[in-house]
Image (spheres, rainbow, N blue to C red):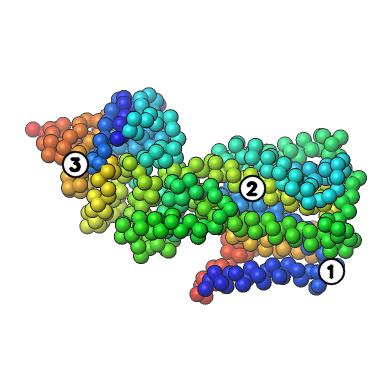
Amino acid sequence: MLSTRNVNKKFGSLVVAEDISLALPKGVRYALIGPNGAGKTTLINLITGMLAPDSGEILLGEETITTLKPFQRVRRGLARTFQINTLFPHLTALDSVTLAVLEREGHAHNWWRALPSFSAATDEAAAILTTLNLQKTLHRETRELAYGQQRLLEIALALATRPRVLLLDEPAAGVPKGESAELFAAVEGLSSELTVLFIEHDMDVVFRFASRILVMVGGRILVEGAPRDIARDERVREVYLGAGHAA
Amino acid sequence: MANANTRWLEVIFWLGTLLPFVLAPNYLSLASQIAITALFALSLDLILGYAGIVSLGHAAFFGVGAYVAGLIAKHWWTEPLSGLLLAGLLAGIAGYALSHIVVRFRHLALIMLTMGFGLLLHEAANSASALTGGADGLQGFKVPGVLGFNFDMFGRTAYAYALAVLFLSFLVCRRVIHSPFGLALRGIRENATRMPAIGAPSLAHLRKAYTIAAVMAGLAGAALTHTTSTVSLETLSFGRSADVLVILILGGAGRLYGGLIGAILYMVARDQFSGVNPQYWYFWIGLLLVAVVMFLPNGVLGGLSALYKKRQ
């Protein structure tokens, strides 16, 4: 569904992505792990078009999207969330998600019809928020929501674009451990047609929710495999526990 | 309930705009200036208050509208409504052309850029004196009236005309704000980074908003030309761009009525202060601005809105 071929990116002499080639099949839940500074968020920025690669190719399905603008990639089915809440503080949760639905449907350019006449978009937005257990927050401004609710709203905004591939950048960052399992349970309940790649530091969550794991170190993909294989991989143990624990 | 209250306040406001005909018949010329300035402020509110585009050169479109209306009246015909529409159209074309550059910038660069374009146009009009009359302004034409009503010396027709243009433009602006496009503009103002991530072509939205605002500013400029039968270089001046920004800050940006309230406050204050002290009246305007920004940082309407919420 989503693939990259030999993607490279440097900031001056600092290599942040080196020869990254991935292939994420449809419906698979991927975890992207690695130490701080490994280049995980940079990889998401490259895939979503917020950064341009120096070389390499990014494909969504059969289509090359390397040179497309971020909003064009979203319209083709590639959505993301942000590590730090990137929301609309003074819009209500319902208005925020309705806006995303209107953009997807191509209605957001319409300036001659009143918003209430787009009730289908509002209904869909309310349904998405309800799916994520945010039905009580519909008419509250985003800035008034609890932090965990704002993290869920991040996901709701991405889902409103009806993605084929969803990239979640530390969706549970800052969320108490008990609540993060709840958040990932919501992610797990998403359509099995949807490919999900999530960055996460909590290994309990990673091994519980991911069906495949990618490990990044120093801008490179170190290894990719099933959770059981990754847990046993000596290179991964070395990265996380140090050379003394590898054997 | 809040919506019903708002609706009533709107009806009262617009009925109140008719009061000068009865209560202040000697001030109808000032009232028409206020209506035109209010329309100009409304157009700035669309880009500043709703889309977050700070402009210090918005008079460029006001001036384009004023000169187009003046040139039509001087060289071709004096029927104002067609002149008004053409002036709005040409100001919109100018706005659309400039928008391709302007919307790519934010913050300080944007302020400098819009100010630069405003100054360029001002000096271009100044140097093209054969066409514009230069520093003497465009004169030698007279718009007799509109729809069979003559522009009288008391300013009755002028105010009715300016008020009608303001009201119709306001209705369009209100529809824009309460449309999906208006929601998208608020989204850009709230978080320009997030918008592409929900599939929004933010730059295209901003270009459209900038163009609509330019049309409205052009209409305001043309209305001024029709009601005064003269066009001065001042219509393109930096001072006019700065004044309208002050008006919006006074009234409250991003509130639809902020520009209207700000225009009333500013123009009446200017009229009264300049009457008291013709030389130093800007001192009092400065004091008013400082007081509003210190005590009502979201403008008069923002302060009233906060007060209403507190009481609720």
Evaluate whether label 1 is on the same chain as label 3.
no
Q: CA distance from mark 2 to mark 3?
A: 51 Å
At label 3, the amino acid type is: Ser
Q: What residue is rendered at 13% in x and 34% in y?
A: A233
In the foreground, A50 or A212: A212
Q: CA distance from mark 1 to mark 2?
A: 33 Å
Q: What residue is rendered at 88% in x and 58% in y?
A: B150
Q: What residue is rendered at 76% in x and 64% in y?
A: B268
Does residue A207 show up? yes
Residue beneath disc 3: A211
Q: Position of residue A37 (x, y in %)?
A: 30, 36
- Residue at disc 2, secondary structure: helix
Q: What residue is rendered at 63% in x and 62% in y?
A: B257
At label 1, the amino acid type is: Pro
Which label number is shown at residue B212? 2
State which chain disc 3 sits on. Answer: A
In the foreground, A9 or B279: A9
Residue beneath disc 1: B25
Against A228, residue A118 (above or below) is below
State which chain disc 2 sits on. Answer: B
Q: Specify the quadrant of the image occupied by residue B32.
A: bottom right
Q: CA distance from mark 1 to mark 3?
A: 79 Å
Is residue A213 left or right of A88 when viewed as pictured? Answer: left
At label 2, the amino acid type is: Ile
Is residue B209 left or right of A77 when viewed as pictured? Answer: right
Is residue A124 left or right of B188 when viewed as pictured? Answer: left
Q: Given contact means CB atoms under 8 Å apart, are the residues at marks 2 and 3 in contact?
A: no
- Residue at disc 3, secondary structure: loop
